[in-house]
Image: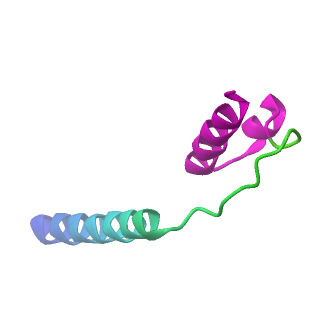
Amino acid sequence: MKSKTNVAITLAAAALLGIFGYRSLTRQVQPVAVNAENCTQEHIRAVTDAMERSILSAQCAKARKP
């Protein structure tokens, strides 16, 4: 009985991880306009999503390059 419960819990956890992973990989990041207002440290730190934050930071660094 205990092994059936463990298998069920393991399968449920694997299914949830698969769903969250699939949603994370298929999500498209919205492009952000790069300007002086969006490239401040405070604005970059205020972005909650790590992927969007890194893209914005890279675009701001690229825009600062002469």
The answer to whether 20 appears left or right of 7 in the picture is: right
Image point (67%, 28%), residue name: 65
Give the quarter of the image for residue 53: top right
Closer to the camera in the image, 13 or 42: 42
Closer to the camera in the image, 32 or 3: 32
Whether residue 63 is in magenta: the answer is yes
Closer to the camera in the image, 1 or 6: 6
Whether residue 44 is in magenta: the answer is yes
Q: Name the spot of residue 4 as percent of width and height, x first.
A: 13, 72
Residue placed furthest toward the front: 66
Q: Name the spot of residue 57 as percent of width and height, x first.
A: 65, 37
Q: How is the image coloured?
A: rainbow
Image point (82%, 43%), residue name: 38
The answer to whether 12 appears left or right of 38 in the picture is: left
Closer to the camera in the image, 12 or 63: 63
Image point (55%, 48%), residue name: 51
Residue placed furthest toward the right: 37
Quarter of the image containing the N terminus? bottom left
Q: Name the spot of residue 44 as percent of width and height, x first.
A: 74, 38
Give the quarter of the image for residue 33: bottom right
Magenta residue span: 39-66
Image point (69%, 27%), residue name: 66
Q: Main secondary structure of the magenta part?
A: helix
The answer to whether 47 is drawn above or below residue 28 in the figure is: above
Give the quarter of the image for residue 14: bottom left
The answer to whether 48 is drawn above or below residue 61 in the figure is: below
